Image: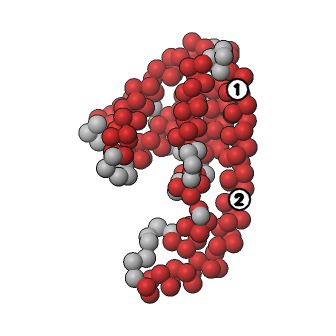
Amino acid sequence: AAALDRAFLGEDVPMRAADFARAVDDGRSRFVLVAQEMGPTAAGISAEHAALQKKLAGMAKTFPQQAEDAKGQLVRLLAPGWLARTPWQRLQHFPRYLKAGSLRMDKLRADPARDARLAAEIAPLQAGWLREVAARARYGAPSAELEQFGWLLEELRVSLFAQELKTPVPVSAKRLGKLWHSIGK
């Protein structure tokens, strides 16, 4: 479904028959290439997911709060339909997000106090965002601003827990706090 959407529809859903026919003609030549490109990305995401799940199973008894936080992240990122639902540009970051979760679990054993301090930075931002997403879900899809804020929260997780993986944009709890305030939440 993701490859079909990306190859045939792209950014816009055609509203007229002629536009639809043109999208089908244009997409035929791209479909196999798009599917071949998406396959390794999906496989990489699945591999990182499996590795993180394995670590979480071993950490759940010792660090239940952190394990639950990471599981919540997995549920949000990899909810049913994640491959088709997630824009391709964002999907390419999933392996890094999952790798950051694994690195967090590795570092947690060495310094639980550090993890708790970093988790406290993201917790209020994430809680506010989750509340707003839940409230908006009653009325349809979240706004583009709210969706973008969610992706920035994922980048903040990378920045806090796995700095060595780098983020494509500068991100900090302070910056996200200001952004959250500016979008009126």
Q: Is residue 181 visible?
A: yes
Instruction: Kindly give the residue lying farthest to the bottom in the view shown.
Output: 18
Q: Which residue is mark 2?
A: 39
Q: Residue at x 67, y 66 (%)?
A: 35
**Which badge, 1 or 2, is on the more N-terminal residue?**
2
Q: Left or right? Give the position of 169 relative to 91.
A: left
Q: Secondary structure at mark 1?
A: helix
Determine whether 68 is above or below 116 in the image: below
Please state the horizontal and vertical placement of residue 27, each as a whole percent of the image: 58, 77
Q: Residue at x 47, y 81 (%)?
A: 20
Q: Is residue 167 visible?
A: no
Determine whether 141 is above or below 19 in the image: above
Q: Quadrant of the C terminus?
A: top left
Q: Residue at x 72, y 51 (%)?
A: 43
**Viewer-nearest residue: 170 or 46:** 46
Please state the horizontal and vertical placement of residue 184, each as a whole percent of the image: 26, 39
Please state the horizontal and vertical placement of residue 110, each as a whole percent of the image: 68, 15
Structural crowding at the residue carrying mark 2, measured as other residues with C-alpha within 10 Å and reported as few (<14), some (14–19) or many (≥20): few
Name which residue type carries label 1: Ala
The answer to which image quadrant residue 126 occupies is: top left
Name which residue type carries label 2: Gly
Please state the horizontal and vertical placement of residue 138, each as a whole percent of the image: 33, 46
**Viewer-nearest residue: 34 or 181:** 34
Q: Left or right? Give the position of 172 relative to 84.
A: left
Determine whether 132 is above or below 43 in the image: above
Structural crowding at the residue carrying mark 1, measured as other residues with C-alpha within 10 Å and reported as few (<14), some (14–19) or many (≥20): few
- Contact? badges 1 and 2 (CB < 8 Å): no
Q: Secondary structure at mark 2?
A: helix
Give how far apart the Cα atoms at labels 1 and 2 are.
27 Å
- Between marks 1 and 2 in the image, the one whose residue lies nearer the viewer: 1
Q: Which residue is mark 1?
A: 57
Q: Quadrant of the N terminus?
A: bottom right
